[in-house]
């Protein structure tokens, strides 16, 4: 998978533009399976997870054109359904969490799908019950083969039928998958407790552009009137808000001034405010975010004087994908903060590496960590570490960029899954990062 070698302690300067949103890309690219007409998607990031999904579609017979960087034209007019029973397909699905997103479109359009248990980050249990229960509510039958770790879903002979459903959790991917399955179902589907993250909103916009009838955009109550077929459309991905947050954290940890360009600031939700709670100043300049250089940043307390808690929550709460970054930033704040990772049970285990680098962190349990900031009085020192997942990987990279000495981060394929050419882009800001293919 290779390694990053990072010489820490250098200031950053200049501007950087976030890539297209990874999580949105996995959803809208899967949606091209819903129609036989061409669908154009722009601002697609060149990252492993997205490229693997595109390769999966190509293996299924989807025609893919690349007229320009970041722009793809998909045409799923001759899908090879036999391919989804091959060992190659099962192997690809097992390594890609996003492979789950093709289930809804295939089930809706072709009535049957066979899929291996999806892979992805090693961050604890990530069940797919919400997806399956939603498909079953639309009339699909479900069989799981524990030996193959694969499942089969099949629609009734006369197709899926709309229904009312109350999701057991506001799952982003679950909502997206059920939404894609329901647009071609007969009758009306109502999804309550639906996720309303920008990714789902963007998918909804694409589906409407393709001819779907959906109301409730941006809310947790979606109503879908099924249609006979969808047509082609053109769609542009939002900037990746996780990258925006990562760059804010990098600037703060390196006590640097940078401009983050074209952020879609009105779509960032509570993210800027959560960084401000850590004492980081931010200025919005049009659609850009300017992070000024600060020698120190002090964590706020709650109004009653109690310790600040930063926790993830369904949108419009804070995305769990940024808690790892905020935890690292807090190690150099003035003050203390409780980081509460509610949604995933193993995402905080990477703090052992930060503790080895000199951070003062108390890991209370798999979900909570108390960070006691150094206020830049005691810099982290270099370390050797392995990236267990995408978000922990970028957090480790941020820590290494601020640390004293030269750090090595292995298993950087995890970082490459979510961040396009991250080493090259950060070098353009002044970071000292080299890639080793060992």
Image (tube, rainbow, N blue to C red):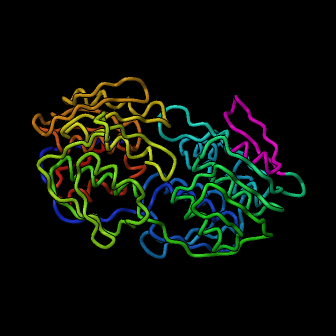
Q: Looking at the image, is 251 positioned above or below residue 260?
A: above
Q: Answer with left or right where residue 133 lies relative to residue 203.
A: right
Give coordinates of residue 231: x percent, y percent.
69, 75
146 or 246, nearer to the observer: 246
Q: Answer with left or right where residue 100 lies relative to residue 280.
A: right
Magenta residues, start to end: 131-155
Give coordinates of residue 158: x percent, y percent.
90, 58
Q: Looking at the image, is 27 positioned above or below residue 387?
A: below
Q: Answer with left or right where residue 316 lies relative to residue 369.
A: right
Occupied quadrant, residue 211: bottom right
Q: Is residue 137 magenta?
A: yes
Q: Answer with left or right where residue 125 lies relative to residue 308.
A: right
The quadrant of the picture occupied by the C terminus is top left
Furthest residue in direction front, as rendered: 304
320 or 127, nearer to the observer: 320
Q: Residue shown at 18%/53% (left/top)? A: 431
The quadrant of the picture occupied by the N terminus is top left
Give coordinates of residue 152: x percent, y percent.
75, 42
Give coordinates of residue 130: x percent, y percent.
67, 42
Furthest residue in direction right, as rendered: 158
Q: Residue shown at 80%/53% (left/top)? A: 163
- Count of numbered badges drawn on the protein: 0
Q: Residue shown at 64%/70% (left/top)? A: 75
230 or 292, nearer to the observer: 292
């Amino acid at each position: 998978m290779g390694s990053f070698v990072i010489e820490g302690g250098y200031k950053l300067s200049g501007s950087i533009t976030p890539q297209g949103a990874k999580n949105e890309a996995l959803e809208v690219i899967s949606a091209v399976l819903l129609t036989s007409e061409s669908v154009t998607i722009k601002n697609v990031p060149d990252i492993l997870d997205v490229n693997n999904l595109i390769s999966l579609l190509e293996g299924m017979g989807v025609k893919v054109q690349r007229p320009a960087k970041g722009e793809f034209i998909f045409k799923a007019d001759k899908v090879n359904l036999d391919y989804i029973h091959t060992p190659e397909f099962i192997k690809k699905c097992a390594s890609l969490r996003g492979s789950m997103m093709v289930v809804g479109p295939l089930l809706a359009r072709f009535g049957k799908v066979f899929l291996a248990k999806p892979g992805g980050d090693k961050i604890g249990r990530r069940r797919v019950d919400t997806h399956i229960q939603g498909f079953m509510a639309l009339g699909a039958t479900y069989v799981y083969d524990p030996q193959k770790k694969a499942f089969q879903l099949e629609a009734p002979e006369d197709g899926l039928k709309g229904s009312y459903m109350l999701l057991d959790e506001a799952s982003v991917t679950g909502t997206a998958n059920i939404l894609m399955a329901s647009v071609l179902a007969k009758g009306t589907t109502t999804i309550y407790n639906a996720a309303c993250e920008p990714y789902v909103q963007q998918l909804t916009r694409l589906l409407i552009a393709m001819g779907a009838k959906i109301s409730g955009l941006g809310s947790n109550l979606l109503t879908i009137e099924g249609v006979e077929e969808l047509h082609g459309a053109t769609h542009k991905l939002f900037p990746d808000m996780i990258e925006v947050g990562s760059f804010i954290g990098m600037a703060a940890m390196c006590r640097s001034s940078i401009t983050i360009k074209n952020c879609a600031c009105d779509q960032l939700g509570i993210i800027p405010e959560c960084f401000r709670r850590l004492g980081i100043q931010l200025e919005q300049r049009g659609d850009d975010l300017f992070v000024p250089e600060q020698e120190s940043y002090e964590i706020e307390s709650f109004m009653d004087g109690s310790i600040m808690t930063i926790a993830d929550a369904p949108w419009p709460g804070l995305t769990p994908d940024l808690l790892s970054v905020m935890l690292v930033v807090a190690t150099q704040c003035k003050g203390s903060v409780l980081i509460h990772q509610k949604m995933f049970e193993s995402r905080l285990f990477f703090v052992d590496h930060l503790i080895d680098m000199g951070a003062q962190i108390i890991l209370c349990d798999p979900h909570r960590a108390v960070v006691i900031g150094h206020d830049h009085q005691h810099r982290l020192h270099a370390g050797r570490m392995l990236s267990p997942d995408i978000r922990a990987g970028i957090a480790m990279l941020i820590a290494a960029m601020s640390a004293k000495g030269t750090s090595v981060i292995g298993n950087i394929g995890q970082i490459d899954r979510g961040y396009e050419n991250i080493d090259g882009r950060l070098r353009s800001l002044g970071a000292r990062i080299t890639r080793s293919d060992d």
